[in-house]
Amino acid sequence: MSTRHVLLGLLAAGPRHGYGLKRQYDAHFPQARPLAYGQVYTTLQRLVRDGLAAIAGTDSDGGPERTLYRSTSEGTRELARWAHKVTAPAPFVANEIFAKVLVAILRSADAQTPSNGEGADASSYLLAQHAAHMKRIGELRALSTAPGADLSTVLAAEYALAHLEADVGWMDTLATRVDALAAEISESA
């Protein structure tokens, strides 16, 4: 996710100070990677430097004086370009689950005696990971259907659900093939 574009998007509603942008980010992207205040201010400085944002004045609102930032016309055009550009699907997927399963299959294929219990590592891992995914799917379903759930939470939960359900499908398919894959690797080595 592009922090600069997200902040430009939040500035599109009108001038904001860094603290307010951070609060809006947290409210609208509750499931995203946390954004540190320092990252907000550093990004705002870069947006100003690049002509995509400008300082709109200051606001104290009864507290310390804060610098207000606004999007420039170039910032608005940049946001529109970013929002309309299709994101290329990832060419390959390599995450920790994939890596652990592959390593477990390779270890079982390298075992001197396939019946020594080593082949169960990948199967056992898949079962445990499947259970963890199913638990998280249940939590996200409850979150996405909770009365009064805000739009950001619902969209983030549904996006995560789609990915977790795809992972579960992959795990289910792979679970039926683990021993055969290990045997194929052993024979080809």
Image (spheres, rainbow, N blue to C red):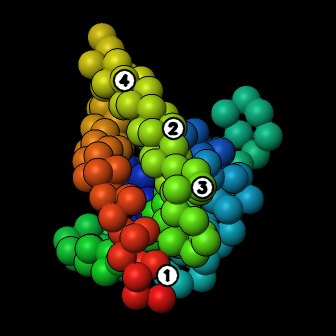
Q: Secondary structure at mark 1?
A: loop
Tag nearer the camera, 4 or 1: 4
Tell me the tag on residue 116: 3
Front residue of 76/59: it is 76
Q: Which residue position is annotated with label 2?
A: 128
**Amino acid at the residue labelled 4:** Gly
Point 37% across, 23% down: residue: 138
Between marks 3 and 4, how big is the CA–CA gap?
36 Å
Q: Position of residue 86 (x, y in %)?
A: 21, 74
**Amino acid at the residue labelled 3:** Asn
Q: Which residue position is annotated with label 4?
A: 138
Disc 1 and disc 2 in contact, CB within 8 angstroms = no
Q: Which residue position is annotated with label 1?
A: 51
The first of marks 1 and 2 along the sequence is: 1
Between marks 2 and 3, how big is the CA–CA gap?
20 Å
Q: Position of residue 97 (x, y in %)?
A: 49, 57
Front residue of 52/145: it is 145
The first of marks 1 and 3 along the sequence is: 1
